[in-house]
Amino acid sequence: MLNIQIVTGLLLIGFQVCAYAGLPNPGMTFDPDRTALVTTDPQNDFLSEKGVTWGVVGKSVVKNNTIKNIESLFKAAKKNNVPVFVSPHYYYQTDYNWKFEGALEKLMHHIKMFDRKDALSIDGFENSGADWLKQYKPYIQDGKTVITSPHKVYGPETNDLVLQLRKRGIDKVILAGMSANLCVESHLRELLEQGFEVVVVKDATAGAQVPEGDGYEAALVNFRYLANAVVTTEDAVKAITNKTAFK
């Protein structure tokens, strides 16, 4: 009798383990008063064929249809009065006085990525690597989009994104932009730590492909581990348009 009880117990445990073998999918409800689209680094150096990183991110951008997908999110958000925030990446001449950098920081400084003359000047900004991709300008420069101060490494810890969201009573974020395992993932992590719900739009981003690994594929694992939901652009646009939940 005891053996039967033990076997039964083991079977029940096995069934429970199987039931929870996959991660849960919390999802996120859509509330127009509390939800915003946040896009990181929709800039030429990442998304233009003339950008300084195109050689390593271009294949991923093309494969994911990233450029068009980001625009689809902008368009859906504007059409449905969803606030749009852009968290950009800029480096000024004074940033070259830093005494140390991580691997990608060192590379970005070396190739003059996101360079601007200084914080108070836009001389040379137009059509530079730091400028917005041309087709995004009507959405970003409409006088309604919130352009935050620049993040200096990868996450929003160094800019005012969280403040700008909090001041508007926003605690739900639809996250997209460049690049997947760097600024997007860093924004995801910090926003979660700050108490936001976050949905990542997985094909409205892309990552570098270098000998050390594929940044996009690496990010997908952590998106699934961390985010409230990981969705396609098509599903995100439907949720925004129909004001339904992200699943």
Image (cartoon, helix red, strand yellow):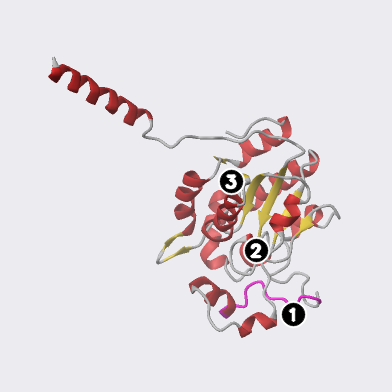
**Residue 243 in picture, x, y percent from top left:** 71, 31
Q: Amino acid at mark 3?
A: Val
Q: Quadrant of the N terminus?
A: top left
Q: Residue at x 66, y 45 (%)?
A: 173
Q: Earlier in the sequence, mark 1 or mark 3?
A: 1
| CA separation in Å, label 2 and label 1 | 20 Å
| CA separation in Å, label 2 and label 3 | 22 Å
Q: Earlier in the sequence, mark 2 or mark 3?
A: 2
Q: Nearer the viewer, residue 72 or 165?
A: 165
Number of numbered discs visible in the structure rendering: 3
Q: Is residue 176 left or right of residue 216?
A: right
Question: What mark, if any, has residue 117 been given in the picture?
Answer: 1
Whether residue 115 appears in magenta in the rendering, the answer is: yes
Q: Secondary structure at mark 2?
A: loop
Q: Residue at x 28, y 23 (%)?
A: 12
Q: Are marks 2 and 3 in contact (CB under 8 Å)?
A: no
Question: What mark, if any, has residue 48 been given in the picture?
Answer: 2
Q: Is residue 76 above or below residue 181?
A: above
Question: What mark, if any, has residue 200 been given in the picture?
Answer: 3
Q: Secondary structure at mark 1?
A: loop
Few, some or many residues within 10 Å of mark 1 (<14, 14–19, 20+): some
Q: Is residue 68 above or below residue 125?
A: above
Residue farthest toward the right in the current orientation of the protein: 143
Q: Is residue 102 above or below residue 41?
A: below
Which portion, as a residue range, is magenta? 110-120
Q: Are marks 1 and 3 in contact (CB under 8 Å)?
A: no
Whether residue 49 is visible, yes or no, is no
